[in-house]
Image: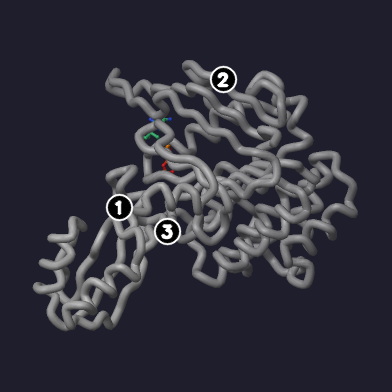
Amino acid sequence: MTAVIHIEGLRKTFRTMRGGARVALNGFDMTVEAGQIHGFLGPNGSGKTTTLRTLLGLVRADDGRMSILGHPAPDALPAVAPRLGAIVESPQFFGNFTGRRTLRLLARAGGVPAERVEAVLTQVGLRDRGNERVKAYSLGMKQRLAVASALLKQPELLILDEPANGLDPAGIREMRDLMRELSTAGITVLVSSHILAEIELICDHVTIISRGQRVATGPVAAVLSGFDKGEYRVRVADLDRAAGVLTTAGLPVTRKEDHLVVADVGDAAWIAEQLGQRGMWVSELTPLTPDLESVFLQLTNSAPEPVPTRQVDEAIQPGTIDLGVQP
Ligand SMILES: Nc1ncnc2c1ncn2[C@@H]1O[C@H](COP(=O)(O)OP(=O)(O)OP(=O)(O)O)[C@@H](O)[C@H]1O
């Protein structure tokens, strides 16, 4: 596997107005391999945007090493910029321009052949709506227009900061399908989010950040299985008696209102047998596989935010970050 993004020991402390210091990144590491749809997950303020901005040369790191597509970042960014698409701020578009015109302008500004406009409109599913004004677009359509603008250069790597923020479930589904299509087309995608459902639906790999440090990374299923305590939900008529039997057998048992949660279960049939032998018939025996939400809570001590907060703005400037021109 080839690392498309590699970050090692990244540190960034911001100076505050009052002369204080805010540690945003505290030795953060991340590796994104070619072909992944990699979720970058963390609570608000955990350092996701700072990481992406640092990677893209928009913020200067205090320490650490980074590379993109095998080249050191940010120094070699101008060389890799044509192979990279990124949206790290809320995309802003002229509301009065059509989607097609917006992309034509961006293509011309970026020296991209005009034919690419139709190709990316098709790719993001906006070809039939390309002649409508952006201000008439739904939030999901604006997000897809932003992705289209980042795809103009036919990038190998796409970096998206909170792409599904503010989207309804249908919009998230469209975004997920789009990410999958891009991945199938050979594009590596890094998606940051503080919304778990989004990451679980969209991504195959995940890196979780908390307080500026990586707290988990790997395929989503592997990260989840690391938290699998072999728990089962057990339902029987006499919960207290069943709890007594299972506790005596050495299993950790938690009594809930209408069921038991039994941990460290190797063989579920053994539970049914033990209780059945004592005349207790099990009406439910369900494995409790951890979900990303409970893992996230354990790792970050922070409740995920179910309600999206940021919106795509309509404003004067169209565009995504032009990596060729560093601020
Ligand atoms: N320019 C800045 N000046 C001072 N502090 C900053 C600046 N940018 C970020 N921070 C601080 O750094 C920390 C990390 O912020 P960052 O925006 O990277 O988090 P995030 O994970 O992207 O959060 P969100 O999901 O809310 O976008 C926060 O404490 C934030 O207040």
Q: Amino acid at mark 3?
A: Pro
Query: Is there CB contact under 8 Å for labels 2 and 1?
Result: no
Q: For ligand 1, tell me if the residue under mark 1 lies within 8 Å.
A: no
Quadrant (top left/top right/bottom left/bottom right) for the N terminus: top right
Residue at screen point 77% across, 61% down: 123
Closer to the camera in the image, 51 or 278: 278
Q: CA distance from mark 3 to mark 2?
A: 32 Å
Please identify the quarter of the rendering in which residue 145 is found: bottom right
What secondary structure is found at the residue carrying circle 3? Answer: loop
- Using the numbered discs, state the Cα–Cα distance from disc 3 to disc 1 in whole angstroms: 13 Å
Say if residue 219 shows up in the picture. yes
Query: In the displayed structure, does residue 59 sit left or right of residue 180?
Result: left
Give the residue type that dot 2 points to. Arg
Secondary structure under the numbered disc 2 in the rendered image: strand
The residue wearing badge 1 is: 303
Task: Identify residue for label 3.
Answer: 308
Q: Contact, CB < 8 Å: mark 3 with mark 1?
A: no
Disc 2 and disc 1: Cα gap in Å? 31 Å
**Sequence-first tag of 3 and 2:** 2
**Picture quadrant of residue 97:** bottom right
In the structure shown, which secondary structural element does the residue marked by tag 1 occupy? loop
Q: Which residue is mark 2?
A: 65
- Residue at the spot 78% in from the left edge and 48% down from the top edge: 152
